[in-house]
Image (tube, rainbow, N blue to C red):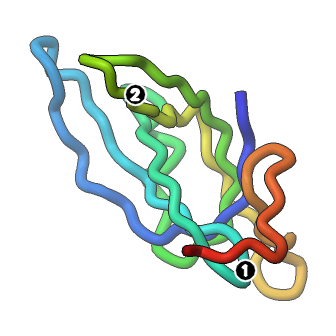
Amino acid sequence: MFTIKAKVAGLGEPQEVGRNNNTKQDLILEYGSQYPKKLVVSFWGDAIESIKSLSEGDDVEVEFRAESREYNGRWFTNCNGKSATTLGQGDDAPELSPPGDVEDADVSPF
């Protein structure tokens, strides 16, 4: 399980997916300061409740599971959200950080 502190860059519309019509909603996060990066975390079923009250620009802490799978010789990665919590606003808000121990200091985006 991973945790990331980031800013909400957007919230997708709920979608009915698959044969069983499971509900999915994407949360788009932005993290990093010098070269901001985006991460899409998909929330499924009851986990969607934790993101319903979020708005663009909110500082959040998101707990998610990352998994990869191979299909026809190509690899695909999904980030599936477990929960999202709104963080304090203004001066009390923590510095936004990438997941885990990832550092992006002195790294060019190219």
| Residue lying furthest top | 20
Element marked by disc 1: loop
How far apart marks 2 and 1 lie (CA) works out to: 28 Å
Instruction: Give the residue number, with chain letter if any, for mark 1.
Output: 33
Q: In this view, does 23 lie to the left or right of 37?
A: left
Q: Please give the name of the residue rendered at 31% of the width and 20% of the height, measured from the top-left corner.
A: 73
What residue type is disc 2 on? Answer: Trp
- Quarter of the image containing the C terminus? bottom right
User: Pointer 1: residues within 10 angstroms few (<14), some, or many (20+)?
Assistant: few
Q: Is residue 82 left or right of residue 32?
A: left
Q: Which label sits in the foreground, 2 or 1?
A: 2
Q: Nearer the viewer, residue 14 or 78?
A: 78
User: Pointer 2: residues within 10 angstroms few (<14), some, or many (20+)?
Assistant: few
> What is the tally of numbered marks visible in this picture?
2
The mark nearer the N terminus, 2 or 1, is: 1
Q: Is residue 96 left or right of residue 53?
A: right
Relative vertical location of residue 104 with respect to residue 77 in this rendering, above or below: below
To which quarter of the image does residue 100 belong? top right
Q: Which of 22 and 95 is in front in this view?
A: 95
- Quarter of the image containing the N terminus? top right
What residue type is disc 1 on? Answer: Ser
Locate residue 62, reporting x and y percent. 65, 47
Q: Nearer the viewer, residue 67 or 14?
A: 67
Instruction: Give the residue number, with chain letter if any, for mark 2.
Output: 75
Q: Please give the name of the residue rendered at 40% of the width and 27% of the height, measured from the top-left corner.
A: 75
Q: Please give the name of the residue rendered at 42% of the width and 40% of the height, measured from the top-left corner.
A: 42
Element marked by disc 2: strand
